[in-house]
Image (cartoon, helix red, strand yellow):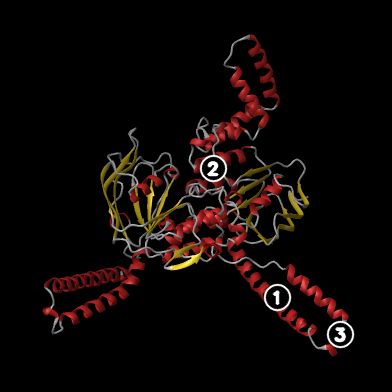
Amino acid sequence: MALLSLDEISLAFGVHPLLDKASLIIERGERVCLLGRNGEGKSTLLKVISGDVTPDGGQVQLEDGARLAVLPQNLPSDDTRTAYEVVAEAFPEAARLLAEFHELSQHTDEASLNKLMKVQERLEAVDGWRLDQKVSGILAQYRVDPDQRLNTLSGGWQRRVLLAKALVAEPDVLMLDEPTNHLDVPAIAWLEEALGQFRGAILFVSHDRAFVRRMATRVVELDRGQLISFAASYDKYLELKEKALEEEERQNALFDKRLKQEEAWIRQGIKARRTRNMGRVRALKAMREERRMRRERGGTASFAVEDAARSGRLVVEAVDAGFAYPNGKTIIDEMNLTIMRGDKIGLVGENGTGKTTLVKLLLGDLEATEGKIRLGTNREVAYFDQLRGELDLSATALDNLAQGREYIEINGQQKHVLGYLQEFLFSPARARSPVSVFSGGERARLMLAKLFSKPANILVLDEPTNDLDVETLELLESQLVNFGGTVIVISHDREFLDNVVTDTLVLDGSGRVQEFVGGYSDWRDQGGMFPSEKPADAEPAKTDKPKAVQKPVEVAKPKAAKLSYKFRLELEKLPARIEELEGEVAAVQETVSGPDFYSQPADEVARVLARLSACEQELEEAIARWMELEELAGQ
């Protein structure tokens, strides 16, 4: 018997069913990744399996005696319980008895002592002391303070507590809904290791491509109410899915062509009607019904970033900058950093190392407590909040975006708000629904819609990949790569960082901010490690006030035998830039050579000559840089 089986599950909330007689079998030891577009019903399917949602039809069957545990997608909003209490909830009776035991142990009266003995007997009967050790042990393994209250923890640490609760009961089936959300990269690596040793079955929803590649032994896609299984790796699934879609389009085209021919036949003249084949008429009616019932695959998101006027060439410069809280805790120490217009910066570090604080310093929302931070000019910042705090859950998507407007201006063009939301895959009916009923992915898309509706030349994205489906992720990546402004992104998605950023800033928790050229993988290739990954007996670093950032060229100097990604990109762009500068110099020289040039007002003559001098100097610098990189590439 299968460990978990779904037999023709049906569930409908609207016009089209979320689940349309969907079936699935999962065996022990399988790690099944459930994929699908945002809003297809993946989280709802997990709720059907867990029993939180009752299907309209079909049956969910779990092997006799098997236990199931769930890691939910959403974090608790205001949970005042301690981490210990949350994890111990996996053993409800033992948790209640332990709490009662600790409460009674504070009293010395005879009644309390008698009751304490009864509670202790019951605890021993349900093996409560061993369960207490398991809860304490897994919290220690996760490095979580058992007395820390959940509402005082960051999103990443809350996720650790909920993971501990899911795993502590040693379930046979473990269901994880976006388990990497809010986790830092070392925690994801640990999670991959822990799940790899799990002996039961795992069903998980994730759009973290690196995590799916590492974990999935099978991919199941939820598409238009059906569960389609691909017994393949993630990369092989992508190939098979593309072929399946091409075949579906071909079959639909053939069907539509035949239907069109039959519709033409039925509309022939009176004479034809007298000799009509009634079997053919019935077949046409069946074809009409089949075409009516066909569920088309949803469209692909199509959006663009609205560019503001260009910022100054310098975006931000930090010289020996630091930040410490009034209690004396240093978050950033002696940081030296320069960010120029067009840079794509990724921030990497374990939770609590100060990534958000660093972003606030770079944006000018916080002032450095030591050193100096100089902000560039003409900065227009758009901020993407990982907690979706800018969304009013009681309002509709339309109201969240429009705020009373019927049209918004995107890159100089007027767009109707409903039309703009359709580019983010919100139908008019969905756009008028309250945000409180949206899935995590839909909320993320709405945040992107708000973000990209504002003119910006600096985009700051805090965990933008959480809950986004793969197609939207890939579109977001291409938009950020082509964006002419500056991008600062905090992300745990390793593949996203590799595809977008040109520089990586690594925070190790000691206050240091180290700069490396390239993305996450480039940093790892250069020997980069998180503090938690280093051996415990490793020689400690000197504590003589380490420099937060070595000069970029010193820290990430490319090896002579191979240009780094950033330098290769610079070398590829230089010839076109040199040609452009040569054209500008020639044009200004032609103006200066004109017979009437010096008869103009003196300030105009000085302006043009200054422009010529600046162009010639920039051209010389570009040629020198090109020669330097060519020499490095040839070594």
Q: Nearer the viewer, residue 379 or 136?
A: 379
* Residue 465 in view (yes/no): no
- In three-dimensional space, the C-alpha distance between marks 2 and 1, rounded to whole angstroms, equals 45 Å
Q: Residue drawn at (53%, 36%), measured in percent from left and top?
A: 150
Question: Please, what is the three-letter code of the amino acid marked with disc 2?
Answer: Arg
Q: Is residue 448 left or right of residue 100?
A: left
Q: Give residue 291's quadrant in the image.
A: bottom right
Tell me where residue 290 appears, x and y as whole percent. 76, 71
State which tag comes first along the sequence, 3 or 2. 2
Label 3 element class: loop
Q: In terms of image quadrants, where is residue 316?
A: bottom left
Q: Nearer the viewer, residue 138 or 459?
A: 459
Crowd tier of the residue under label 3, counting other residues whose Cα lies within 10 Å: few below 14, some 14–19, many 20 or above: some
Q: Residues within 10 Å of mark 1 (few under 14, many from 20)?
A: few
The x, y position of residue 259, in whole percent, is 75, 79
Residue type marked 3: Arg
Kindly indicate whether the residue at mark 3 contacts the one at mark 1 (C-beta within 8 angstroms): no
The residue beneath circle 3 is 276
Residue at screen point 66% across, 28% down: 94
Mark 1 — residue? Answer: 251
Residue 17 in the image: above or below residue 506:
below
Name the secondary structure under disc 1.
helix
The amino acid type, in three-letter code, at marker 1 is Gln
Instruction: Identify the residue position indicated by label 2 in the image.
Output: 159
Image coords of residue 320 (percent x, y): 26, 46
Query: Dot 2, how many residues are within 10 Å of its Cα: few (below 14), some (14-19), or many (20+)?
Result: many
Q: Is residue 522 left or right of residue 125?
A: left
Residue furthest out toward the bottom: 271
Residue 311 seen anywhere in this rendered image of the structure:
yes
Q: Kindly identify the residue that appears in the image at 60 percent across and 68 percent down.
A: 239
Residue ID at (28%, 46%)? 321
Quote the CA–CA distance across marks 3 and 2. Answer: 67 Å
